[in-house]
Amino acid sequence: MSEHLDLIMFAGLMAAILTGFPVSFAIAGVGIGFAFLGWTLGVMDLSLLGALGQRVFGLISNQVLIAIPLFVLMGAVLEKSRIAEELLSTMGRLFGGLRGGLGISVVLVGTLLAASTGIVGATVVAMGMIALPAMLRAGYDARVASGIVCTAGTLGQIIPPSTLLIILADVMSNAYQQAQYEQGKFSVETLSVGQFFAAALMPGLMLVGLYLVYILLRGLIRPQDMPPASDMAARPDMAEVFRAIVPPVLLIFAVLGAILGGVATPTEAASVGAVGAMLMAGHRIGVNPRIIVTGAVALIVLGVAAGAFPVRLQRSDLSPAAYAAGAAYIALALIGLVAVALALRGMLRERVIHEALNSTLTMTAMIFATILAAGIFSLVFIGLGGEERVAAILSQLPGGATGALVFSMIFIFILGFFLDFVEISVIVLPLVTPTLIVMGHDPIWLGVLIAINLQTSFLTPPFGFSLFYLRGAAPEEVRTTQIYRGVIPFIGLQAIGMILIWALPPIATWLPGVLF
C-alpha cells in the first residue's frame, strides 16, 4: 500500500470534499493525516513540512494575489448597489421584442458584468432573480432560459479581469519557471497577469460570439422556445441606454486599459476599479451627481496627465511649470477625494458598503484559505512521490506531448464535476503544467485552454457551482433537471471553443505577443 499512498491520498481528498465539510479544512486535514501516515509507514520525511512556513509567507507577500480582494470588492460594490440590476433591466427592454432577444440581452449583460465584476455567483444570482422570471413570462422554454443564464454568468471566469486568471497566472508563471530550471535555464523568464488577461480577451469574446450564434439559430429553428417578449416595459430611449451602459464600459476600459497598456500593475488597476465602482455606486444611490461626475473626471485627468507628465516634487531642480503642474495634480486629487468621500458616506448611509465588504471578506477568505490548505496538501503529495508519478504518467502516454495534453484536459474536465476552480488550480495544475511546458506547449496558450476548461467546470452537473447558484435563485417551477439539461448545449459550445483555440493558437497568443 505504501508505494501507492500518493494515489490513495488524492482519492481521499475527493472523498473528504464530497462529504460537505469546509473545503479548506478538508484539504489541509487530508494533507496532515497522510503526512503522519506516510511517516508511520516510513515513506515520508516529516521535515519536509518545514517548508510550509515559507509557502505561507510567499502567499501573503505575493503582489499578484493582492489584486484578488480589490477586484472582488469592485464586483461586490456594483452588485450591492444594484448597478448590475439596472443594466440587466435596460438591456432586457432594449432587445426583448426580438425573437431570442431576452437571451441575447442576458449574454451581453453577462459579458459586461464579467468584465466589470468577475464574480460568477453574484452574476448568476442577479440574472436568475431578474432575467429568468422575465424569460419564463415571455414563454421561453425553462431549459433554454436556465442554460443561457448559467452560461452567461460563468463568463466572469474567462473574460478579464477574473479571479481565475489571476490565480492561474501565478500558478502558470511558477510552473514556467520550474520548467525552465528543469531544462537547465537559470536565467528564467516570468509571466505576468497582464499577459494572461490579454490572452484570454479574444477567446472570451469568441465564446460570447458562439453563444449569440447559437441563440439566434435556435430562435430560427425552434421559435417556440424563445418567443419575443410582449409584456416588457417601454423600450428605453438612447439616454437611458447611455446611462446604463457607459459607466460600466468606462470602468472596464479604465481597468483593462491600464493593465494591457502597461500603465499600471493588476493590483493598481484593481484599486482604480474599486474606486470607480464606489463612484458609480454613489451616483446610483443619489449622491450629488455633479460632484460625482466632476470627481470622476478629475481622477481620470489626473491619471492620464500624471502618466504622461510625471512630476516629482521632492526634487530641488524643478521649473515653475513643474510646480504649477504639481499644484494642479494636487487640486485634481483633492476634488477626486471629496467625490469618493461623499460616495462612501452615501454607501454607509444605505448600508451598501457593509454588504459589499462582507461579501468581499467572505470570498477572499475562502480563496486564500484554500490556497494555504493546498500548500499543505501539495507538500505532502510531493513528499509521497506524487510529483514524480504524475510526470512519469504524462511522459509515458501515447501521442507524446499531444497525448499528454489531451489526457490532462480530460482529467481537469472530470475533476470539474467535483472540485472548484481554486482547488484544481492550486492542487492539480502545479503537478501537471511543468511537465506539459517541458514537452513544448506554450504556457500562455496552455493557460487559456485550461481557463476555458475550468470555466466549463462551473456548468457540469452534478456539482457545477453555477447550477447551484441558479437553483437557489430560480423560481420554484423551474426544476433542477431542467437546469441540468439546459446547460448541455453550452458545454458543447465550450468544447467547440477549446477546439478552435487548439487548432488556431493565435486566438490566444496574438494579443499578448503584440502588447508584451
Image (cartoon, helix red, strand yellow):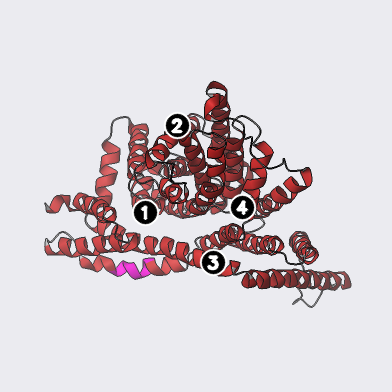
Q: Residues within 10 Å of mark 4 (few under 14, many from 20)?
A: many
Task: Bin the neighbour count of mark 2 within 10 Å (Cα to Cα): few under 14, some 14-19, many 20 and up.
Answer: some
For the point 39% across and 64% down, the residue is 369
Residue 489 numbered mark, or none: 2
Magenta stretch contains residue 128? no
Query: Which amino acid is tagged 3?
Result: Glu
| Label 3 packing within 10 angstroms: few (<14), some (14-19), many (20+) | some
Q: What residue is drawn where x is 63% and y is 50%?
A: 260
Query: Which residue occupies the foreground of this view, 485 or 280?
Result: 485
- Judged from the image, the secondary structure of the residue bearing numbered disc 4 is helix
Q: Secondary structure at mark 2?
A: helix
Residue span colored magenta: 50-55
Quadrant housing residue 380? bottom left
Name the element at disc 1.
Answer: helix
| Residue beneath disc 3 | 355
Q: Earlier in the sequence, mark 1 or mark 2?
A: 1
Q: Which mark is residue 84?
A: 4
Residue 324 is left or right of residue 449, and the answer is right
Q: Amino acid at mark 2?
A: Pro
Which amino acid type is marked by label 1? Answer: Glu
